[in-house]
Amino acid sequence: MNLLVIGSGGREHALCWALSASPLVTKLVCAPGNPGIGQVARLAPVNPTDLDAVLQLCRDEHIDFVVVGPEAPLVAGLVDHLEAAGFACFGPTKSAARLEGSKGFMKDLCAKYGIPTAAYGRFKDAASAEAFIRKQGAPIVVKADGLAAGKGVTVAMTLDEALAANNALFAEPGAEVVIEEFLDGEEVSFFALVDGRHALALASAQDHKRVGDGDTGPNTGGMGAYSPAPALTPALQSEVMEKIINPTVAAMAAEGAPFKGVLFAGLMLTKDGTKLLEYNTRFGDPECQTLMLRLKSDLLPALIAARDGVLKDFDLRWRDDTALCVVMAAEGYPGEPRKGTVIEGLDAAAAESDVQVFHAGTAQRADGAIVANGGRVLGICAYGPSVKAAKQRAYAAVDKIRWPEGFCRRDIGWRAVAREQQ
């Protein structure tokens, strides 16, 4: 098969790395990709949200199957555009991608179908939202309704912080805001493939959103992750499928927007049970990197089965080992990252058989040097028999990279390591 992967981040590098191992793939193209992806796929300089340009690329390359990585082209309707022209795609339609594209839509769906989530309000003007915040008090969560690259959420511990976040969001023309009750507990991620009617549980992971060690500083798109997440026990996973994932699949079908693709549920494990924080309608980044390291089965047939509606009797095999990913980010992130700085030592970092280096925000100069070209730049991943072992291997690889202008958290996996030591 001729395969096209859409995207340019660490998630897409991990997907291309996994898909390149499939015996079903005869040609692998990635648009636009990055230098790391270029080691396993041919790169095509096409903007993922230019729907007509992607369609022309599919025609030029005689593509048989398209895997859409990031959320923006999904929300823009890329799957609808390509499917209408006869190209099979993995990913939800524009209507189904509203689960991520509009937090308000997701919350309303949960309320209508009894899916456990935080209490909330939706607002289109700052004054009404401010009144709601003052009535509810802090701590409280303030979210942009639309896509925000993982950074449009403020967990406000004080009233002043909540009001400032509200004012900042409504400074944007046409803004809509969702304000939620604060849920106390441990946050985990859970992934399932969906074919419109059936869901196949994949695996759990735990992300680290805050930029600094000890979960300090502002939210980011993710500074590291590991899979599986010990906090999400097999019993809790069954509960998530029964009370959250399967009801969502049924609800979307009932609403006339059947969901196909991957559901990424952000969950909070509270004393009152597991509750849905939000849905993403694509693989997480950096969670995807850890999932791909653990996956023993061929990924491609599973993605095709999801698109074709035949997941019901499908199964996947996973490594028992833990996979852990450390994100290396550019100086300035999550604000304005410093670009163009040279990164060395990548081959040395990836020399061990249990280590994989995924590129995210990188570029290659004419002289061959790899340079930073974004905020989150690299994902240094490793697996091992325990979270502690995987963590040690990942950080040993990180320490081989020579990039003075880069930084990372040094405590990825800390919750699970603490559990292992109990």
Image (tube, grey):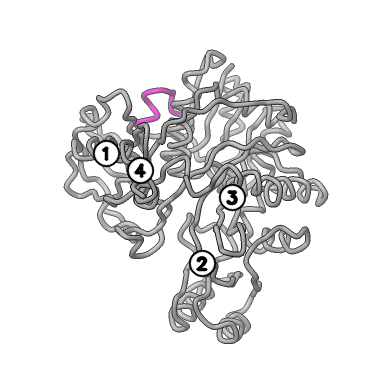
Q: Which circle marks residue 140 in the picture? A: none
Q: CA distance from mark 1 to mark 3?
A: 28 Å
Could you tell me residue 317's position as x and y percent? Answer: 55, 25
* Dot 1 amino acid type: Gln
Residue 357 versus residue 113: which sits nearer the camera?
A: 113
For the residues bearing labels 1 and 3, Cβ distance under 8 angstroms: no
Tell me the element at label 2.
Answer: loop
Residues rendered magenta in the picture: 35-43
Residue sitting at 21 percent across and 45 percent down? 341
Q: Which circle marks residue 392 in the picture? A: 1
Tell me the element at label 3.
Answer: strand
Residue 231 versus residue 315: which sits nearer the camera?
A: 231
Q: Which circle marks residue 265 in the picture? A: 3
Residue 5 lies within the magenta run: no
Indicate which disc, 3 or 4, sits on the residue closer to the N terminus.
3
Q: CA distance from mark 3 to mark 4?
A: 25 Å
* Dot 4 amino acid type: Gly
Residue sitting at 29 percent across and 37 percent down? 394
| Closer to the eye: label 4 or 1 | 1
